[in-house]
Image (cartoon, rainbow, N blue to C red):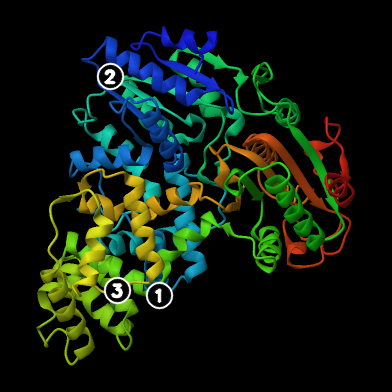
């Protein structure tokens, strides 16, 4: 690409000095940072450089651009993968159960939360609240989070939690940065990888704990290069805040490099998005993002419909016009919503009219299917035969093995200072310990036989293919066919990269989340606004842009404004926002739940460059 003067100034930056690149949507930050790191590695081959992103989707986008740049020497990863690598390289420093085992979403919901609730007598809802409270502390480093839960109740939970997680040997993804901070603070000689420069993309998504970790790493001699955009800080749910990147220049006494020209959005799209974000009351004064010389003019409209079915039908007609008259492929069209109920009405209309669409958030649900969970448990036992959550999964999925058997194993493990898995594999034949439980004995015997027969190489480029062959040979349980198809897609996406089997299995859930955002030929993507972050398409339709839904009645109003800005800046050529004047179906309960009442326009759009127009009239003129 032809780099601007702003980008060329970055290329001259001294890699020994901290810096912040403040880059709005479409300003070429990824290409800029990849080019900068490539030049640094060429000029200073002795320097060790690491490029990190917050989300895996952002890392996937970066990886693609790295391949496009033909510089595979630039390595990227996520903040969480960096934390994991440091903790693995420094065993015994984190205070976590070892070997490090991260519980996935299904295990947390179906095993951990329910079992903790049963043992503590606190109930699943309270356990959820207490885990959320604990996560809030890990992420914000603030002990007082405004919770009304009593200290006595917190103490009771922490006692059960500490015992439970040691016996089942798990950790939660949200605590990894906190444990990294704990390890750094307690170990002056901790091996942090000896990086000279760490570049962190999507820096605005880091929370207080993440920020503290990298500040301590910087104090040990590593240069930090922060890249991001405070206008796209939308992860308040994990305690991220735009203040992190806004204060970087003063915190690190660093140089600030702004990128102010968007090469993505059409001029009208950018004018409208700028109006929305410039109403953000906590936002520092800065120049408006301007379009590049080659940017299209753009087509924009704010369309009002009478009812939710009218809105969904109108969106279908817009999509048909975009794909037919404007010849935009379906995969270049995004339909975004703030709530699932608004999305459901659109999906119903698409299904009736046999329009193919993808639901990125639904792909991960394949891992929740019964047969798939059984296979995943066995695969995890191939890595570690004593994997407690894997054994717990198989017991949970096997009929006629009840909670009493789980309690017997749990209590035996507690008394002998073993894990649940160790207790089961080492003692299941002892009928004095597990008298008369033939179902449990058969489960363990059959599973151990499967694990013994399933031989795997140490490394492989196509683990999905390897797993499928073992299934064909009858050496592994067969999952649902859709999961096998996804394994093929994961292999293809990995492009033959060799990896350890343990790494492959531990990354299955995040890999599926990555696949969710990949364009599928012929399929329109329907997703939440937050999930669209980092994507670029030719056309975007955002549904339900009305007061009570955007913004939602609870939460940070300024973050709601930033979220809308993120959705509006995905598109290069076409941007349509829709609203309902009244909602009477399921979507009537979205947001503020204004059933059948008159719904006002989104207040973030009032007085802006685009006024509301009747949706049916607008679409009729397109025909």
**Image position, residue 419 (x, y; %):** 19, 65
Q: Quadrant of residue 269?
A: top right
**Image position, residue 219 (x, y; %):** 32, 20
User: Residue at position x 32%, y 41% from top?
Assistant: 81
**Distance of label 2 from label 1 (alpha carbons):** 49 Å
Q: Quadrant of residue 274?
A: top right
Nearer the observer: mark 2 or 1; the answer is: 2
Residue at image mark 1: 118
Residue at image mark 3: 478
Nearer the observer: mark 3 or 1; the answer is: 3
Residue situated in front as seen by the camera: 136 or 331: 331
Q: Residues within 10 Å of mark 1 (few under 14, many from 20)?
A: some
Horizontal relation, residue 455 to residue 400: left or right: left
Q: Are marks 3 and 1 in contact (CB under 8 Å)?
A: no
Specify which label sits upstream in the sequence, 3 or 1. Answer: 1
Horizontal relation, residue 347 to residue 226: left or right: right
**Distance of label 3 from label 1 (alpha carbons):** 32 Å
Q: Secondary structure at mark 1?
A: helix
**Distance of label 2 from label 3 (alpha carbons):** 47 Å
Nearer the observer: mark 2 or 3; the answer is: 3
Rendered view: 468 above or below 361: below
Specify which label sits upstream in the sequence, 2 or 1. Answer: 1
Residue situated in front as seen by the camera: 355 or 214: 355
Q: Residues within 10 Å of mark 2 (few under 14, many from 20)?
A: some
Residue at image mark 2: 196
Q: Are marks 2 and 3 in contact (CB under 8 Å)?
A: no
Specify which label sits upstream in the sequence, 2 or 3. Answer: 2
User: Residue at position x 87%, y 57% from top?
Assistant: 306
């Amino acid at each position: 690409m032809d780099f601007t003067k702003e980008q060329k100034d970055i290329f001259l930056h001294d890699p020994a000095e901290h810096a912040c690149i403040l880059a709005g949507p479409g300003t070429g930050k990824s290409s800029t940072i990849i080019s900068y790191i490539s030049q640094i590695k060429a000029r200073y081959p002795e320097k060790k450089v690491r490029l990190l992103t917050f989300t895996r989707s952002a890392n996937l986008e970066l990886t693609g651009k790295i391949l496009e740049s033909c510089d595979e020497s630039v390595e990227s990863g996520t903040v969480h993968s960096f934390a994991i690598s440091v903790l693995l390289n420094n065993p015994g420093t984190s205070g976590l159960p070892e070997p490090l085992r991260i519980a996935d979403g299904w295990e947390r919901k179906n095993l951990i939360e329910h079992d903790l609730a049963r043992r503590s007598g606190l109930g699943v809802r309270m356990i959820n609240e207490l885990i959320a409270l604990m996560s809030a502390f890990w992420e914000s480093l603030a002990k007082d989070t405004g919770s009304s839960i009593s200290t006595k109740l917190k103490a009771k939970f922490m006692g059960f939690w500490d015992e439970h997680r040691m016996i089942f040997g798990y950790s939660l993804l949200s605590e990894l940065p906190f444990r990294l901070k704990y390890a750094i603070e307690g170990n002056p000689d901790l091996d942090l990888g000896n990086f000279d420069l760490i570049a962190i993309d999507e820096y605005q998504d880091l929370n207080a704990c993440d920020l503290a970790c990298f500040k301590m790493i910087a104090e040990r001699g590593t240069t930090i290069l922060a890249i991001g955009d405070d206008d796209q800080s939308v992860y308040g749910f994990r305690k991220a805040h735009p203040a992190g990147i806004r204060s970087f220049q003063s915190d690190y006494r660093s140089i600030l490099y702004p990128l102010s020209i968007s090469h993505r959005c059409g001029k009208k799209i950018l004018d409208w998005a700028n109006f929305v974000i410039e109403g953000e009351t906590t936002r520092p004064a800065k120049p408006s993002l301007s379009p590049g010389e080659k940017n299209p003019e753009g087509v924009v409209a704010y369309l009002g419909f009478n009812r939710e079915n009218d809105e969904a039908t109108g969106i279908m007609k817009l999509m048909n016009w975009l794909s037919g008259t404007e010849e935009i492929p379906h995969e270049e069209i995004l339909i975004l919503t703030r709530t699932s109920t608004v999305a459901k009405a659109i999906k119903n209309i698409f299904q009736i009219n046999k329009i193919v669409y993808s639901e990125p958030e639904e792909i991960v649900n394949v891992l929740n299917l019964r047969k798939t969970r059984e296979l995943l448990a066995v695969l995890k036992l191939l890595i570690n035969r004593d994997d407690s959550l894997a054994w717990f999964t198989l017991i949970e999925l096997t009929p006629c093995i009840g909670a009493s058997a789980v309690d017997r194993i749990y209590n035996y493990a507690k008394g002998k200072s073993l894990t649940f898995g160790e207790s089961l594999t080492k003692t299941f034949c002892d009928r004095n310990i597990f008298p008369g439980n033939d179902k449990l004995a058969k489960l363990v015997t059959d599973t151990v036989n499967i694990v013994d027969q399933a031989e795997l190489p140490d490394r492989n480029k196509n683990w999905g293919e390897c797993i499928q062959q073992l299934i064909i040979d009858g050496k592994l349980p067969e999952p649902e066919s859709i999961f096998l198809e996804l394994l093929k897609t994961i292999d293809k996406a990995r492009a033959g990269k060799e990896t350890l089997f343990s790494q492959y299995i531990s990354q299955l859930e995040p890999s599926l989340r990555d696949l969710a955002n990949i364009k599928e030929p012929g399929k329109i993507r329907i997703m939440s606004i937050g999930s669209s972050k980092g994507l670029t398409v030719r056309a975007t339709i955002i549904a339900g842009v009305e007061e009570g839904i955007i913004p939602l009645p609870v939460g940070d109003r300024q973050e709601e404004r930033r979220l809308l800005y993120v959705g509006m800046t995905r598109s290069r050529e076409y941007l349509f926002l829709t609203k309902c004047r009244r909602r009477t179906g399921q979507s009537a309960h979205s947001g503020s739940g204004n059933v059948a009442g008159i719904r006002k326009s989104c207040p973030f759009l009032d007085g802006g460059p685009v006024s509301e127009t009747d949706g049916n009239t607008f679409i009729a003129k397109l025909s």
